[in-house]
Image: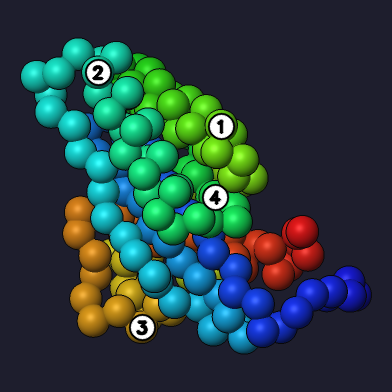
Amino acid sequence: MKKIIGNSNSTLRILGIDPGTATTGWAIVEEKNGEIFSAAYGDISTAKSNSDDSRILEMAQDLEKIIKKHKPAEAAIESLFFFKNQKTVIQVAQSRGAMLLTLRQNNVKVFGYTPLQVKQALTGYGRAEKKQMQLMTKNILHLNRIPKPDDTADALAIAVCHINSRKFNNLK
């Protein structure tokens, strides 16, 4: 058994990110005294009419504003997984790369989780349906309703996954 070291009264603030080109979901989830709650969440949306480089710059700039405002200790971001649509995977990879660079430039430690890991951490079942994930996230964080768009709900789930993984893996 690993010994947990630290001040139980301290607040841990995690930034969850579900990367995308059109919409990137983000969430700030905090843990204090063993309680997990949502501090803020939303999405970064870009116009399809803008060039890819303009969209990526806009996402990075918006993420930097979120980091400066909320000052997360760590970030959890969805890892890439197999996509059937190669165009989609390239766009998501570009977005994720911009997010990783922005986090690194702002000295935020980053952890990646696959959708399977997130589902397993929240529901105990790696093939849980999206609706099950959303309901579990809503219940864990004591939210009045499931956040929209889905990317935002996914970002909340990714942050909760990281908090639970930290406990299990005794991350520092």
Label 4 element class:
strand
Q: Amino acid at mark 2?
A: Ser
Q: Nearer the viewer, mark 1 or mark 4?
A: 1
- Does residue 118 lie above or below 139 as drawn? above
Q: Amino acid at mark 3?
A: His
The quadrant in which residue 69 appears is bottom left
Which of marks 4 and 1 precedes in the sequence?
4
**Picture coordinates of residue 98, whole percent (x, y):** 44, 26
- Does residue 56 lie above or below 103 as drawn? above
- Does residue 122 lie above or below 80 as drawn? below
Marks 3 and 2 sit apart, C-alpha to C-alpha, by: 37 Å
Label 3 element class:
loop
What residue lies at 24% left-to-right and 70% top-to-bottom? 146
Q: Which mark is residue 90?
A: none
What residue lies at 55% left-to-right and 38% top-to-bottom? 106
Q: Amino acid at mark 4?
A: Ala
Give the position of the C terminus as an image quadrant. bottom right
Which of marks 4 and 3 precedes in the sequence?
4
**Residue 157 in sight from this viewpoint:** no
Marks 3 and 4 sit apart, C-alpha to C-alpha, by: 21 Å
**Picture coordinates of residue 104, whole percent (x, y):** 59, 34
Q: Amino acid at mark 1?
A: Gln
* Residue bearing the label numbered 4: 75
What residue lies at 27% left-to-right and 55% top-to-bottom? 42
- Does residue 78 lie above or below 60 as drawn? below
* Residue bearing the label numbered 2: 54
Marks 3 and 1 sit apart, C-alpha to C-alpha, by: 33 Å
* Residue bearing the label numbered 3: 142
Which of marks 1 and 2 precedes in the sequence?
2
Marks 2 and 4 sit apart, C-alpha to C-alpha, by: 24 Å
Which of marks 1 and 3 precedes in the sequence?
1
* Residue bearing the label numbered 1: 105
